[in-house]
């Protein structure tokens, strides 16, 4: 498997929430001989159809979608309204290049615009930019031109237009959609490492590629029920805070290894599972960052509440400037995340699943 090529393709492909079909196509190209299926919600499942009912199941989760927009209206002058799909800050959206998927399956270049400074009043110049101030411009001059010539209508997806780059000097990647195409790449790489060992593991290992995480962890509600795991690892691209907080309290710095999350606004991680991951990292000499997040959320918030409760841990590759067009991440951190998960899974034994039985008092 050409890992750098995989990460480049995953970053460059467009897949706003609810429109993940092309990301699934890229994933499928890298699943090898393992069975891969998808559902009508654009969720993908790797190795699902070979599950042994006599074994417990470990779910290795990632999400396919990226933050984007949806065309919400078109003005008579040809300006295009933007409805956010996921969390955006208006200042990060202004004057950026986007791609709109039109009704002919073509990508149309667009620029996000607002009223130019020449026409702002003194009061308007002091006001904070709001999302509703922003419009998409494809260079048209009328609504009819947008619809008839460009093939753009209400309801079509919009994603950032950025090309992946790799800096060989410091092994740093630059691109869009690292949240969470880096996680998708981790899941594929873990299966690539373990493909010849899957039948010998004391558990089923199923890869999950969920849709619509950025708009409410929706796909994972379905994948967790279909897979019905006893244990899960959610693989994410977590926001780094190395430029947002003093170094002594930063919990996600580029180049310092994967980040293990203890809580966020959607769940509290399994202390037992987190400790086993910490122990594995120490045994293998893998640097590990530990985070207690005051906000944010991942698919863990949907998975851990499935059926009778699932033991879940979240591992993330730190990413600088998440939920913007241009994101940095360390390739070494990404590699370490793969190595840690592979090592953790290899040392799991049948007795590690016994706590799922009801405890007698």
Image (cartoon, helix red, strand yellow):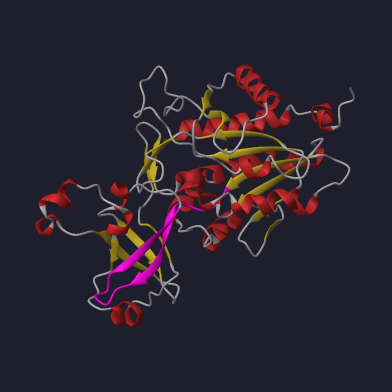
Stretch of the chain drawn in magenta: 63-85
Quadrant the C terminus occupies: top right
Residue that sits furthest to the front in the current view: 123
Residue at (35% x, 29% y) in the render:
244
The majority secondary structure of the magenta stretch comes to strand
Residue 8 placement (x, y as % from top left)? 45, 49
User: Quick check: 326 above or below 355?
Assistant: below
Residue 325 place in picture, x, y as percent: 35, 49
Q: Residue at x 81, y 28 (%)?
A: 355
Residue at 28%, 59% in the rendered image: 134
Q: Is residue 26 magenta?
A: no
Instruction: Give x and y (percent) for residue 222.
Output: 68, 54
User: Is residue 76 part of the magenta span, yes or no?
Assistant: yes
Residue 273 percent coordinates (x, y): 69, 27
In the image, residue 10 above or below residue 311: below
Q: Relative to 160, is 181 on the left or the right? A: right
Q: Is residue 88 above or below residue 103?
A: above
């Amino acid at each position: 498997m050409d890992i750098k090529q995989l990460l480049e393709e995953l970053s460059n492909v467009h897949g706003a929430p609810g429109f993940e079909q092309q990301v699934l196509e890229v994933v499928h190209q890298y699943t090898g001989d393992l069975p891969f299926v998808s559902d009508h919600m654009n969720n993908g499942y790797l190795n699902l159809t070979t599950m042994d009912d006599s074994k417990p199941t470990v779910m290795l989760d990632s999400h396919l979608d990226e933050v984007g927009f949806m065309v919400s209206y078109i003005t008579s002058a040809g300006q295009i309204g933007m409805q956010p799909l996921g969390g955006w800050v208006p200042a990060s959206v202004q004057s950026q290049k986007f791609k709109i998927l039109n009704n002919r399956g073509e990508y149309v270049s667009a620029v996000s615009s607002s009223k130019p400074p020449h026409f702002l009043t003194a009061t308007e110049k002091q006001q904070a930019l709001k999302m509703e101030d922003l419009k998409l411009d494809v260079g048209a001059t009328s609504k009819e031109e947008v619809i008839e010539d460009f093939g753009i209508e209400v309801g079509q997806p919009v994603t950032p237009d950025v090309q992946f780059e790799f800096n060989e000097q410091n092994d740093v990647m630059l691109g869009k959609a690292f949240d969470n195409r880096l996680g998708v790449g981790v899941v594929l790489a873990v299966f690539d490492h373990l493909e010849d060992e899957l039948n010998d593991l004391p558990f089923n290992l199923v890869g999950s590629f969920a849709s619509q995480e950025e708009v409410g962890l929706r796909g994972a509600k379905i994948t967790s029920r279909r897979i019905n795991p006893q244990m899960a690892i959610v693989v994410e691209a977590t926001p780094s805070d190395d430029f947002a907080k003093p170094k002594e309290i930063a919990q996600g710095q580029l180049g310092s290894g994967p980040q293990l999350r203890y809580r966020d606004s959607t769940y509290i991680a399994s202390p037992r599972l987190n400790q086993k991951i910490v122990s594995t990292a120490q045994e293998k000499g893998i640097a590990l960052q530990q985070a207690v997040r005051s906000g944010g959320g991942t698919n863990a918030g949907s998975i851990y509440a499935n059926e009778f409760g699932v033991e879940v841990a979240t591992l993330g590759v730190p990413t600088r400037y998440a939920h913007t067009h241009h994101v940095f991440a360390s390739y070494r951190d990404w590699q370490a995340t793969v190595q840690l998960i592979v090592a953790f899974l290899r040392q799991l034994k049948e007795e590690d699943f016994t706590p799922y039985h009801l405890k007698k008092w």
